[in-house]
Amino acid sequence: MYKLLLVDDERLILEGISQVVDWEQAGTELAGTARNGIEALDKIELLSPDIVITDISMPGLDGLGLVEQCSERYPAIKFVMLTGYKDFDYACSAMQHGVKHYLLKPCNEQQIQEALTELVQELDERISREQFATEMKHRLTKVLPHVKEQFLKEWISNKTYGSRDLDYYQELFGIELGGKSVRLILFRLEESFEYEHLFALQNIAQDMLAEVLLSTTIGAQLLILLEQPEAADNQSDLLERIAEVQEIFFNFYKIHATIAVSDKGRMIHSRSLYRQTLQCMNHRFYLEEGSLITGSDIPADELSGRNEIELNEEQICLLVKAGDQVAVDNELERLFGLLADQRFDINVTRSYVLQLYSAMIRLCLPDERSSFTSGLAELAELGTLGSLKAYVMKAAERLTAMYDRHFMTRQSSIVDKMLRIIEADYCNSELSLGSVAAEMLYMNPDYLGKIFKKVTGEKFSNYVANYRIGKASEHIIRSGDVKVFELAELYGFGGNAQYFSQVFKKVTGMTPTDFMKPQ
């Protein structure tokens, strides 16, 4: 029901309209009446009506003055103007304040009800639009982090993106990008790792580096875009904080992260900054694992760039570790297609293939590594691109199958830990997927939720609800008659007896009260 205020200085008209109109049938309730505009303003502030029916000619503050003041202070209110023939032209000036409904005196209850029906429909439509906008905003808020990650990934690799695209995305994200001086940081994990380690590193970096604008994972690497004001000469401080991110991550997971840091530059030039981080990362061959490499560590002739192709063996390794055979095959087809297009000398092409195969060897479990390593000699003897491709694809298929088995075991161990947390903490009403992720040291909640459902077949929230109701049912069987609000307090529903009862009935098929009755 929409609240309505009726305003008229004539008592008989005020009482008459109040009594004859079926307010409820029109979708409204008469919240109050007023005898003039000044009294109406007080009532509007007190009652917050959605609709005001007002006479136009009143002493003190007339109907038009009331509309003018409300259009500034209460713009959402809908007005119906009551007017005589002589005032109609004057009343039409209220249109500039959005008034569209006028009733000529004398009017009957049918005319008033028809006007109210139109207004109620307008209000319903407005609420529907607002709910839709709120829902869209909520959905956008949920997907925005993923959109940001995808944008950065495509921006630094897609030459067709230009300044117009940048304008669009910075407006979508609510951050300025085009006018900023930025720096790119590329993290590479050196030892064997899982997906969650990249997420953890990303979260630690975002906690420690306040200048982060965007971040994304690219293959087996993490890329972060930082704001770096041109006037500020703070590289040493930044490098210290980056090293601290590196140290915190190693203390948690005992995995080294090699880090490449670009020079400062404009956002529009970030692709060249990204290429610089890749060149810095390639220089790790000459340094220890876990190094922090900047442009000053690279000889000038290397930074000038060479005409090479980027095989991106990290991506194929990531797909192998995920146990995704179809994706592995597709990526290898793409990589060998790229080599075929380049028409390099066979020795140059073979060197790229050996580089790719060596990256795969690093993924091998210890008892399999020797057999894969022996394949290097066989690859060196093959004389065609087709034979090289067939050999690598067969090796990748074997390695992917290993990881598929390992990955399922790894996921099961993660879920086992989640189940132990649930068993220990199910009485806590604050237990959530987010809180479990926090207990598991920077693991991503979305990733945990997907693993949990894959292994258990249930969403995390459903599993927790069923577990709590199971424990509550056992309590009822042991104790007999017990108060519902006590059960809600004991078993993680924060004392909300109504919600507990709803969930209990959904899970067991009966209310807690019925469950307590002798069967």
Image (cartoon, grey):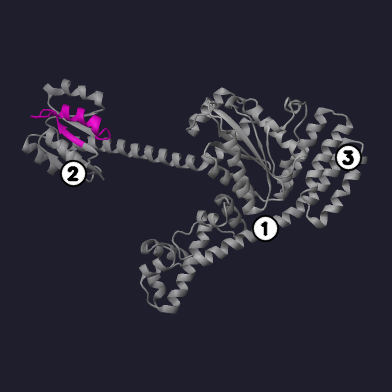
Tell me the element at label 2.
Answer: strand
| Of pointers 3 and 1, the one earlier in the residue sequence | 3
Q: What residue type is labelled 2?
A: Leu
Is 194 rendered above or below residue 46?
Answer: below
Q: Whole-Å distance between the Cαs marked 1 and 2?
A: 64 Å
In this view of the protein, which residue sits in the foreground, 55 or 203? 203
Residue 48 magenta = no
Marks 3 and 1: which is nearer the front?
1
Observer able to see residue 519: no
Q: Residue at x 87, y 37 (%)?
A: 386
Q: Quadrant of the N terminus?
A: top left
- Label pair 1/2, CB-CB below 8 angstroms: no
Q: Quadrant of the C terminus?
A: bottom left
Q: Where is residue 154 in the image (x, y as percent from the top left)?
A: 62, 32
Q: Which amino acid does label 3 sit on?
A: Ser
| Of pointers 2 and 3, the one earlier in the residue sequence | 2
Return the mark for residue 410: 1
Q: In this view, does 501 lie to the left or right of 383?
A: left
**Residue under numbered circle 3:** 387
| Of pointers 1 and 2, the one earlier in the residue sequence | 2
Q: Which residue is drawn at 58% across and 41% down?
A: 241
Span colored in magenta? 52-77
Tell me the element at label 1.
Answer: helix
* The quarter of the displayed image where residue 281 is located: top right
Q: How crowded is mark 3: few (under 14 residues within 10 Å), some or many (20 or more)?
A: few
Q: Where is residue 127 in the image (x, y as percent from the top left)?
A: 34, 39
Q: Which residue is drawn at 45% across and 79% down?
A: 478
Return the mark for residue 30: 2
Tell me the element at label 3.
Answer: helix
Return the mark for residue 429: none
